Image: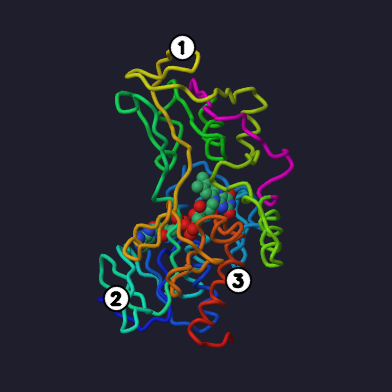
Amino acid sequence: MDDGCVDADLVIVGGGQAGLAVAYYARRAGLRLVVLDAEGCPGGAWQHMWDSLRLFSPASSSAMPGWPMPEGSEDPPGRGHVVDYLTRYEDRYGFDVRRPVRVTAVERCGPDRTRLLVRSDTGEQAAPAVVSATGTWRRPFWPTYPGQAAFRGRQLHVSAYKAPTPYVGRRVLVVGGGNSGAQVMAELAPVATATWVVPREPRFLPDDVDGRALFAAASRRRAAILRGEAVDGGIAGVGGLGDVVVVPTVRAARDAGLLRTSPPFRAFTSEGVVWRDGRSEPIDAVIWCTGFRPVLDHLRPLRIRHEGRVDVAGTRSVDVPGLWLVGYGDWTGPGSATLAGVGPTARDTVREVVAALGRTAP
Ligand code: FAD
């Protein structure tokens, strides 16, 4: 970088849990590394999630590599506990994390075009290896509906949702049948006239099954991939549209009969929506809990993005051998978009980086 340029073996783009998990193994392997993170503070996306968010699984099942998550005052912990954990995690290992640094482009460079140049809003850094770990939070996905632009009510993606207070007594649609939709619906339903708009009836995991079941499924899938077996689909997505984990708020709202669902509406009007049966209903706000897409804008100069993804073998780009992608979802490693699941993927990625650099693992 211009500000204190380091001679790095590895540049990690993104300092959330995925970037830090890679940093952990890279540091252990003796690589010189720098982490560039667009946030002002540690914690990645967890800093921005809604106030009441609790993890799907206990602290003991949410460990990053090397240092388990400490127990907090509540278990499963809230998002603030995760931010604190990740803050202490990067302090503990003394990673060179630069903030706020937004990477604007990754390009091929060097005489044989095998090195990569990472450009950012504070300078540039060349390295033989780059791991992209920019997550999905900065790219919320909104579907489009007829008449949407004319709707005069409030529309927001769940990435901008903080608390139910602004919606008390309002008519609200919560769109999306995954975990985000379930949790937001559960806290709005007691205080607002809320309808949960879902393409199909939500599938709840059994009450005594928490996120650990998703991690176990990811581990089985990972083992099958390592054995060279064909695997279909992915695990139920965390933060995606998979099976709903019945966290305490969701259970309470469900048991009280408050999780009123409806199939998608046909169109917006200026005042609300028109349902499929032709009935119009005034609506004050729509909260889109419709997922996220990988944040890959910085890879545009490499021309390797197809339909919002990059072709990878494991986590390594098929087209740019010095580039790896970690943490985006099952396509970059089963369960790698979770706290407990990213470690094995990060370890395998660093093994490949070490081999590609011609080093031997310690
Ligand atoms: P992020 O946390 O988003 O970190 C990416 C970092 O990269 C950010 O700091 C970002 O600012 C930075 N960045 C982005 N673009 C650039 C750029 N161009 N230059 C520099 N930096 C950049 N997981 C669990 O294990 N348990 C749960 O209970 C759980 N609940 C979830 C609930 C919700 C609602 C959601 C959305 C997710 C949940 N997850 C859970 C999933 C997962 O743990 C998070 O999505 C996690 O934040 C992903 O980590 P990450 O490091 O890949 O991405």
- Residue type beneath disc 2: Met
Alpha carbons under labels 2 and 1: distance apart: 59 Å
Horizontal and vertical percent for residue 136? 45, 52
Q: Quadrant of residue 102?
A: bottom left
240 sits left or right of 151 in the view: right
Looking at the rendering, the stretch of residues picked out in magenta corresponds to 190-213
Tag 1's secondary structure? loop
- According to the image, what is the colour scheme of the structure? rainbow
**Most frequent secondary structure within the magenta stretch:** loop
Q: Nearer the viewer, residue 16 or 80?
A: 16
Q: Which residue is mark 3?
A: 66
Residue at image coords 71%, 67% = 227
CB atoms of marks 2 and 1 within 8 Å: no
Disc nearer the start of the sequence (3/2): 2
207 sits left or right of 29 in the view: right
Disc nearer the start of the sequence (1/3): 3
Q: Which residue is mark 2?
A: 1
Is residue 216 visible in the rendered image? The answer is: yes
Horizontal and vertical percent for residue 72? 60, 54
Alpha carbons under labels 1 and 3: distance apart: 56 Å
Q: Which residue is mark 1?
A: 279
